[in-house]
């Protein structure tokens, strides 16, 4: 009945990651995780718990003080084409159009312009931005900017999509719309998604696996597997029995870390 | 016309004319007399020689400031070692009275173009360096991380992300350096007092050719304002960068 079952291949794993800043400030402590392929994993925790640090370690932007990240069993040495990142602040080039921003990753790889534009347009259409390809970021709403960031991440066709609080910089209604669109998009694109969020509802709504980090120093407090059926109508997800219960359950276990 | 300085200019021109006609000061001829001096000035080959020499030294000095200043600023922005070595000097010269250095340049570089060019550079390069560095250090971290995520090499990150991001500050630096270069080219010639407009000024003063002296001052002012106005216009065209960040 459920398409997203728990027993699948592990695509990415972290092995006892520690991140220590300035010899005393421990950001992450002994974080070991298995990320299942083609699933949505949410990293949830109070602010300052090292969620974003963990995601950046996985992305290869931060070198852990000790421990390792493996993709399909192979240790990473930095950012790689198997992982794309969607940024919290969108990280769009203000002097470049939507088309140029979306094509940035391909340009960096030396893909010729014609092919680059074709691929970019395909994903611009997929995220619902067709007609805006010649606009500049400052001419777009927050939601549209994040769609641009998402399209850029999709162009390089990596198996793993990392998202750092992707919907936190947009308003509530836009957030819901983007969440729905993400679920719809993932029905077409076969991706492993790891996203950081501080919203319990967002984690339960989107994720197959919710990793709860404790407060400083960040370590894995609990892993929850929401048994939410997302195969049917997207509008019905929040009405499912167990949805609210799970939100409450996560809140009660998270509460003690929130000061 | 609401905020135009036009009426203010007319008023003060009137005051000048009145004071000049009264002949209270021998150094200040009436403004109407200066009008005729313009025609005389433009007929003199000495004026055009000075004009060409000024344009040449200004152009060479400013170009060198920009071409050398921007890479130094970028280097100081991306390398903390370069910053440590150079920032003391840049900040020292940024606020130092450069005019005092010109007499020391003369015996080294000679009483010719080279000294004026050096003066222009000393006036204008520091602000280019400082502003470029500020632009480079304020590039958003997430943009640099974005470059890394998509596999950009260090040079691609610098040329595709860091330099375009720093463009508004670089343009501001160039505008300020043009203003300073205008001052530098005139101050340099005046201190040397034997070449270019500086030579003309001291000649006119020593022969009491006050109409020509004032006409030349007005010409120099108009030239400065024209150049600065052009640069500001250019900056406004690129201003969309800044507001969109």
Image (cartoon, rainbow, N blue to C red):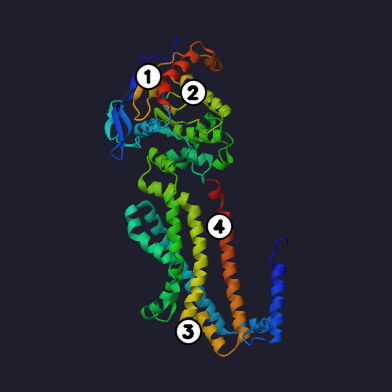
| Pointer 2 chain | A
How far separated are the C-alphas under marks 4 and 2? 45 Å
Q: Nearer the viewer, mark 4 or mark 1?
A: 1
Do the residues bearing badges 4 and 3 touch, measured as CB atoms within 8 Å? no
Q: Is residue B159 left or right of residue B7?
A: left
How far separated are the C-alphas under marks 4 and 3? 35 Å
Q: Nearer the viewer, mark 4 or mark 2?
A: 2
In the rendering, which numbered label is found on residue A149? none
How far separated are the C-alphas under marks 4 and 1? 54 Å
Badge 4 or badge 3: first in the primary sequence: 3
| Quadrant of the rendered image containing residue A136 | top right
| Pointer 1 chain | A
Q: Nearer the viewer, mark 2 or mark 3?
A: 2
Do the residues bearing badges 1 and 3 touch, measured as CB atoms within 8 Å? no
How far separated are the C-alphas under marks 2 and 3? 77 Å
| Badge 4 density bin: few <14, some 14–19, many ≥20, Cα 10 Å | some
Do the residues bearing badges 4 and 1 touch, measured as CB atoms within 8 Å? no
Disc 4 and disc 3 on one polypeptide chain: yes
Q: Which residue is mark 3?
A: B194
Q: Which residue is mark 1?
A: A223
| Pointer 3 chain | B
Disc 2 and disc 3 on one polypeptide chain: no
Q: Which residue is mark 4?
A: B235
Q: Which residue is mark 2?
A: A202
| Pointer 4 chain | B
């Amino acid at each position: 009945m459920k398409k997203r079952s728990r027993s699948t291949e592990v695509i990415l794993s972290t092995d006892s990651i520690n991140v220590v800043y300035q010899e005393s400030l421990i950001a992450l402590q002994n974080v070991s995780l298995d990320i299942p392929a083609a699933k949505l994993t949410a990293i949830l925790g109070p602010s300052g718990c090292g969620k974003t640090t963990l995601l950046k370690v996985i992305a290869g932007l931060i070198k852990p003080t000790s421990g390792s990240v493996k993709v399909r069993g192979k240790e990473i040495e930095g950012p790689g084409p198997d992982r794309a990142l969607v940024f919290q602040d969108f990280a769009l080039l203000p002097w470049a159009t939507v088309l140029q921003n979306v094509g940035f990753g391909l340009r960096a790889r030396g893909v010729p312009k014609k092919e680059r534009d074709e691929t970019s347009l395909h994903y611009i259409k997929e995220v619902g931005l067709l007609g805006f390809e010649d606009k500049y970021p400052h001419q777009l709403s927050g939601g549209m900017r994040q769609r641009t960031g998402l399209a850029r991440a999709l162009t390089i066709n990596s198996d793993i999509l990392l998202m750092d609080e992707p919907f936190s910089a947009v308003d509530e209604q836009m957030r819901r719309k983007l969440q729905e669109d993400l679920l719809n998009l993932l029905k077409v694109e076969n991706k492993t998604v790891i996203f950081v969020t501080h919203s319990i509802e967002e984690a339960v709504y989107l994720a197959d696996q919710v990793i709860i980090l404790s407060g400083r120093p960040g370590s894995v407090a609990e892993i929850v597997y929401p048994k939410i059926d997302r195969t049917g109508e997207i509008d019905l997800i929040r009405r499912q029995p167990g949805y609210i219960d799970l939100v409450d359950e996560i809140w009660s276990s998270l509460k003690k870390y929130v000061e | 016309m609401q905020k135009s300085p036009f009426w203010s200019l007319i008023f003060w021109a009137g005051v000048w004319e009145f004071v000049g006609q009264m002949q209270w000061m021998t150094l200040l001829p009436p403004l109407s007399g200066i009008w005729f001096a313009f025609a005389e000035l433009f007929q003199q080959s000495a004026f055009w020689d000075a004009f060409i020499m000024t344009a040449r030294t200004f152009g060479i000095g400013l170009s060198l400031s920009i071409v050398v200043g921007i890479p130094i600023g970028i280097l100081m922005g991306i390398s903390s070692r370069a910053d440590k070595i150079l920032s003391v000097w840049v900040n020292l010269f940024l606020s130092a009275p450069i005019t005092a250095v010109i007499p020391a340049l003369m015996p080294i570089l000679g009483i010719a173009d080279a000294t004026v060019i050096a003066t222009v550079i000393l006036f204008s390069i520091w602000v280019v360096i400082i502003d470029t560095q500020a632009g480079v250090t304020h590039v958003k971290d997430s943009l640099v991380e974005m470059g890394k995520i998509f596999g950009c090499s260090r040079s691609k990150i610098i040329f595709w992300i860091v330099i375009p991001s720093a463009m508004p500050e670089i343009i501001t630096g160039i505008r300020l350096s043009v203003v300073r270069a205008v001052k530098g080219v005139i101050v340099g010639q005046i201190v040397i007092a034997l070449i270019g407009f500086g030579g003309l000024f001291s000649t006119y003063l020593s022969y009491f050719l006050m109409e020509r002296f004032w006409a030349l001052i007005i010409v120099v002012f108009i030239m400065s304002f024209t150049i600065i106005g052009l640069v500001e216009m250019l900056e406004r065209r690129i201003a969309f960068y800044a507001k969109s960040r």
